[in-house]
Image: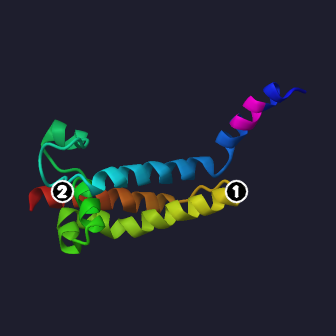
Amino acid sequence: MSCAADGPNRAGALWRHPAAAPVGVLAAGAVGAFHLYGTNPHEPGHWLPRCPFQWATGQLCPACGGTRMVYDLMHGQFTAAWHDNRMLLLAAPFALALLGRWAWEGLRGRRWQPRISGRGQAAILVTALVWTVLRNVF
């Protein structure tokens, strides 16, 4: 078989490797963080996506304030990050741990998907709904 025929197969194999998706997510996150570091979302006029839920309803979604929270964390403003979105700040270490495990397993050549029970999924959903109501009422 010729090298020309072998090339596309190798490239396709790279995209199917278990590490491709987590490494892509980490790279996209790094690019986003690099852009966000120099862009203050507390000030108007920057190119940052607007929350579609807030745009459509005028209400805060469970993740609203997440961009400001990350910006504040990157600049060492922990109190400001707490005020931006408390629930997301508390959930962030768990999400980062899941991303780290996904990347670790992918780099070891294994596919990994977290298993969340039905009760766990219900708890996450109820927590998000309660948080949404509380932050829009108070």
Residue 72 drawn above or below residue 39 = below
Q: Magenta-highlighted stretch: main secondary structure?
A: helix
User: Residue tagged by mark 2?
Assistant: 133
| 127 within the magenta span | no
Q: Residues within 10 Å of mark 1 (few under 14, many from 20)?
A: some
Quadrant position of residue 137: bottom left
Q: Residues within 10 Å of mark 2 (few under 14, many from 20)?
A: some
Q: Which mark is residue 71?
A: none
Residue plotted at (87% across, 26% down)? 2
- Amino acid type at mark 2: Val
Quadrant position of residue 120: bottom left
Q: Where are the magenta residues, as a range? A: 7-11
Q: Residue 51: in sight, yes or no?
A: yes
Q: Nearer the viewer, residue 33 or 78?
A: 33
Rendering coords of residue 125 (x, y %): 35, 56
Rendering coords of residue 56 (x, y %): 18, 36
- Amino acid type at mark 1: Arg
| 10 within the magenta span | yes
Q: Which mark is residue 110?
A: 1
Query: In the visual, does 135 lie left or right of 86?
Result: left
Cβ atoms under marks 1 and 2 closer than 8 Å: no
Residue plotted at (23% across, 50% down)? 61
> How far is the residue under mark 1 from the one under mark 2?
40 Å
